[in-house]
Amino acid sequence: MKKVGILGGTFNPPHIGHLIMANEVYHALQLDEVRFMPNAIAPHKKKEDESTDENRLQMVQLLIKPYKEFTVETIELERGGVSYTYDTMVALREREPDVEFYFIIGGDMIDTLHTWHHIDELVKIVQFVGIKRPGAKSESPYNIIMVEAPDIALSSTLIRERFATGGTLRFLLPPEVEAYIRKEGLYGAK
């Protein structure tokens, strides 16, 4: 069976922390690919109105362009509405019954996994893979494969704040993504 990792998120904006998570899981579990899956409306986050779905999709494509093992999964953007992982994974398994899916989450999501929509059914159809995050307990009663990754306390919130205040962005996101954000005038970028 083909082994595919799914890294979902708002990617508002995507950054090197996302690349590191995907890369560590890709190698640790010897996956065939990792798909970056921007969601339409995240059930656990408030919608940031500044960037569009198309903006976020373009930024993800720029982020992963150099890496053949990383691809984009657009199923949640195409479906629209609130992006429940359970609904997505049911649809992906129907579309690709010969694929074993691994859903990659950070430590903060591990801590709240018990609140996810249809979680008891979800854990039966997908294997969760966790990456510890600084400040998160990363504990759950559910079966999660834990993968070690370098601790980087980086968030899209920090990057948006840096754009708004003119702070340095070097090494936090690829130059192509930064250039796109500046061209589109996102996050108060100048």
Image: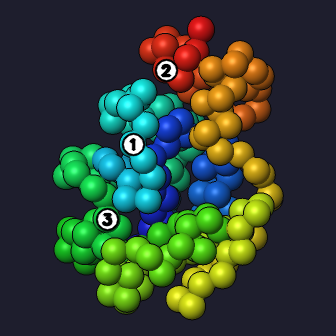
Q: Report if residue 94 is visible in the image.
A: yes
Colouring style: rainbow
Task: In the displayed orientation, state which residue is furthest to the front.
Answer: 46
Residues under labels 2 and 1: Cα distance?
A: 15 Å
Residue 131, image x, y percentages: 66, 68
How far from the left and from the top, in percent, is residue 124? Answer: 37, 89
Q: Earlier in the sequence, mark 3 or mark 1?
A: 1
Q: Residues within 10 Å of mark 1 (few under 14, many from 20)?
A: few
Quadrant where the C terminus sits is: top right
Q: Are marks 3 and 1 in contact (CB under 8 Å)?
A: no
Q: Secondary structure at mark 1?
A: loop
**Residue at (47, 70) in percent of width and height:** 103
Q: Secondary structure at mark 2?
A: helix
Residue on which the image places disc 2: 186
- Closer to the camera, 79 or 186? 186
Residue 165's place in the image compared with 8, above or below, is above
Q: Secondary structure at mark 3?
A: loop
Quarter holding residue 156? top right
**Label 3: few (<14), some (14–19) or many (≥20) C-alpha neighbours in 10 Å:** some
Mark 2 or mark 1: whose residue is earlier in sequence: 1
Question: On the picture, is 127 further left or further right than 91?
Answer: right
Q: Which residue is mark 3?
A: 84
**Could you tell me if the residues under marks 2 and 1 are in contact, i.e. CB atoms within 8 Å?**
no
Q: Residue at x 22, y 51 (%)?
A: 81
